Image (spheres, rainbow, N blue to C red):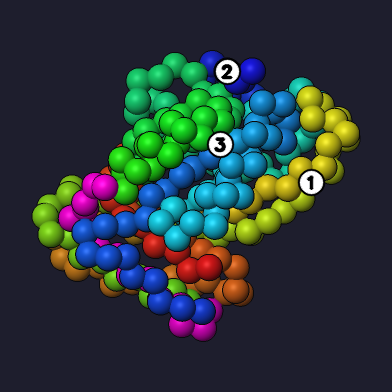
Amino acid sequence: MTRLIPLAFAALASLVTPAAAQSPVVVELFTSQGCSSCPPADAMMHELAKRDDVIALALHVDYWDYIGWKDEFADPAYAERQRGYAIAAGRRSVYTPQMIINGETDIVGARPMELSKVISDHAGKTTAVTLSVARNGDSIRIEAQSAEAQGPMIVQMLRYTPERTARITRGENAGHTLTYANVTEDWKILKEWDGITDLAISADAPGDKPLVVLVQKGVHGPILAAAQIK
């Protein structure tokens, strides 16, 4: 059963350059270790993480922590991001599991056929933004160009751990040991970009964890370009 919650209560090293005018499809999964309907969607992320044409990101939310199990991977900022998507789309509630594809299309629960079609639809679209990302020691060089004015765009960077395992002893998933793919962390906004001038910035990224850079129309609008370094 998909878990629904009103917004008012939701508060409780290599070079990667996408082909010109194309970009990997970004799938954000809002999930929780405390949600009994989430494991099938979590399992789908393992397959998505293997694809070169998809950037799969698991964002663990904290609003189910009160029902008996605190999600150790959760970040309140991810619940806030999910609420922002809901407000932008005119929805009055948030839920888990939910997938947001390229910041535009949402899918309830684990629906592989529907997800496959949505990914295919987005993969066939072109974008005016090209993006390249290169690692240089403990920093990342980010360059982007836009073929047309896009208005304010938000350049974001995040890290992820490709696989994390949790042994859950309480709550709806008590007794299960679950493995999660591409668990997201350290999500930050780097810059607002007008798209008129070319973008060329550097950002600190110590260590060798995979990272993703997104160029998004506002914070909760369509994702116009994405690149990752695994």
Residue 185, given in percent of the width and then of the height, sits at 59, 54
Residues at circles 1 and 2 in contact by the CB criterion of under 8 Å: no
Residue at mark 2 to residue at mark 3: CA–CA distance = 12 Å
Image quadrant assignment for residue 65: top right
Residue at mark 3 to residue at mark 1: CA–CA distance = 17 Å
Residue with the mark numbered 3 = 30
Q: Nearer the viewer, residue 215 or 226?
A: 226
- Residue at 56%, 31% in the rendered image: 110
Label 2 vs 3, first from the N-terminus: 2
Can you name the residue that lies furthest to the left here? 148
State the mark number for residue 91: none
- Residue at 59%, 42% in the rendered image: 44
Label 3 vs 1, first from the N-terminus: 3
Amino acid type, mark 1? Ala
Query: From this viewpoint, is residue 212 visible?
Result: yes
Residue with the mark numbered 1 = 166
Residue at mark 1 to residue at mark 2: CA–CA distance = 23 Å
Say which element carries label 3. Answer: strand
Is residue 163 a member of the stretch shown in magenta? no
Amino acid type, mark 3? Phe
State the mark number for residue 4: 2
Amino acid type, mark 2? Leu
Magenta stretch, residue numbers: 124-138
Residue 61, given in percent of the width and then of the height, sits at 61, 36
- Residue at 37%, 55% in the rendered image: 24
Is residue 134 a member of the stretch shown in magenta? yes
Q: Nearer the viewer, residue 104 or 125?
A: 125
Say which element carries label 2. Answer: strand
Using a 10 Å C-alpha cutoff, classify the residue at mark 2 as few (fewer than 14 neighbours), some (14 to 19) or many (20 or more).
Answer: few
